[in-house]
Image (tube, rainbow, N blue to C red):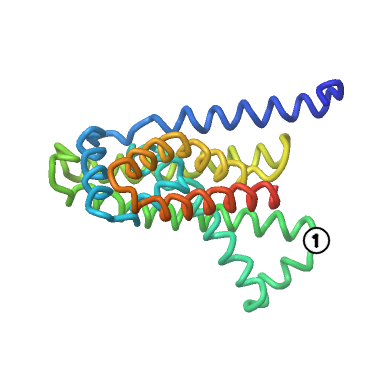
Amino acid sequence: MFRIPDLKKKILFTALFLVLYRMGSFVPIPGVDASALRAFFEGAREGGNTLFGLLDLFVGGNFERASVFALGIMPYITASIVIQLLGSIIPYFEKLRKEGAEGQKKMNQITRYGTVGLGAFNAITITLWLTNLSGGVVPNPGILFHFTGIVTLVTGTMIVMWIGEQITEHGIGNGISLIIFAGIIARYPEGFIRMFQKIGAEPTYAWKAVFAVILMVAVTAAVIFVT
């Protein structure tokens, strides 16, 4: 496989950009106490709240770490879906769809603008949520924190979007799918450790563990199929 220079180059390119994505996942939002936020998530898990865990799964733990990539690629995916739906409803977008490569280029640009807008909305929601958490998650809440937090999160989303586009164009497979896949895979080791600990303390939890493993395999297979 590696005897083919072009394929080797694409594989290395994809691996490099996925590593860059994972490195950025450990850069925190300025002004957030990471240990206090981690304690909040631990308490939520012990209390049986799985919503945060599910959300965190698809962004590779970035939400729990209050990473600059906490929004992940979700604003871009949402914007893409909305634009595609508008292509069947609004004449202007329908016209762009019929213009071939040039029309697709314009739609991609509109999608990027939509990503910024959705990212900003989500970032505002997250910064407000963080400041309302107890336990000193944000030691110094205020206008400065909200401003830097929003700018950081939106910038992070645009970087993730750019990484995905670069992988799609110069690497192997669909960049967006691979980013989601990398985030999910990164959570597997920690997830399995917690799963076995839970089974040891509560044997009846085993059937839930089996369901979780099936879900993990299904998600992995789906991403491989799409890619």
Residue designated by label 1: 100
Q: Would residue 31 appear left or right of 218 to someone viewing this image?
A: left
Residue 218, percent across and down? 59, 53
The image shows residue 87, relative to residue 195, as above or below, that is below
Towards the viewer: 101 or 62 = 62
For this orientation, the residue located farthest to the front is 203
How many numbered marks appear? 1
Q: Residue at x 17, y 44 (%)?
A: 142
Q: Would residue 17 appear left or right of 105 to someone viewing this image?
A: left
Q: Amino acid at mark 1?
A: Gly
Q: Residue at x 34, y 46 (%)?
A: 150
Location of residue 29 (image quadrant): top left
Of helix, strand and loop, which one carries label 1?
loop
Residue 170, percent across and down? 73, 35
Location of residue 12 (image quadrant): top right
Q: Residue at x 30, y 39 (%)?
A: 148
